[in-house]
Amino acid sequence: MLFLLQVGEDKISLISLLQKGGWIMYPLYALLVIAIFVFIERLLAIKKAGANDPKFMLVVRDHIVSGNIAGAKSFAKSTENSVAKMIEKGIMRIGKPLDAIEKSMENVGKLEMYSMERNLNILSLVAGIAPMFGFLGTIVGMVQLFYGIASTGEYTLNTIAGGIYTKMITSATGLIIGLIAYVGHNYLSTQIDKNANRMEVASADFLDILQEPTHS
């Protein structure tokens, strides 16, 4: 069922209303598609990187405390998330000073953060320029409207009001797309922060495990 808007005594479909926005609507549609694509792609990537196995560190601890370093490394390598990649690097550095191990894990953590944040700035860009495109469309439309009035001399209230509301469609569309991109960017940033906290906790736990007595 088409969404209908009430305009005076008439009803107009949302699709018909959007078509009145003119050529500027096409770049706005493109920005919407880009925002949705980037959001979904980043959401899936971040969820994969942040997949949480509550038993992961317990299994790693059991392997290391029992002296089964190879088993701990193999288990970490077979687990597909950012925490596992970081811990795997730490296991590979076992035998070196703790600060060297911590530094190597920190480097992996930075790479994982960079991977999760990749292309996230596109959403921020869309959030900034979509409303500007919308305002540009409204300004261009208003110039055309008043130029037409000046050329023809027709300036009835219906003509002016009808022209203004159709030209403001681009502003409304741009604001909505910008809002969608802004909310999506902030949601993904929150998920990345949660993953970063998990990595920090896992790193601290791993360093604690290394200081426990082993039973090889």
Image (tube, grey):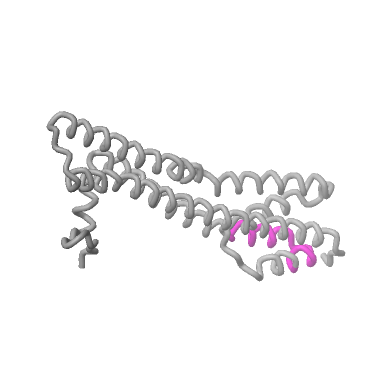
Quadrant occupied by the C terminus: bottom right
Say above or below: 42 vs 142. Answer: below
Image quarter of residue 68? bottom right
Q: Is residue 9 visible?
A: yes
Q: Nearer the viewer, residue 23 or 201?
A: 23
Q: Tell me where the magenta segment starts and ends, as one range.
A: 62-79
The chief SS type of the magenta part is: helix
Residue at 55% over, 46% down: 117
Residue 14 quadrant:
bottom left
Q: Residue 105: image x %, image y %? A: 71, 49
Q: Residue at x 12, y 32 (%)?
A: 152
Measured as percent of width and height from the top left, residue 154 is found at: 14, 37
Left or right side of 48 for 111 = right
Q: Looking at the picture, tell me which residue is in the foreground, 78 or 38.
A: 38
Q: Position of residue 24 (x, y in %)?
A: 28, 39
- Residue 113 at x, y percent in the picture: 61, 48
Horizontal relation, residue 32 to residue 185: left or right: left
Q: Is residue 102 left or right of residue 194?
A: right
Return the residue nearer the eye: 212 or 21.
21
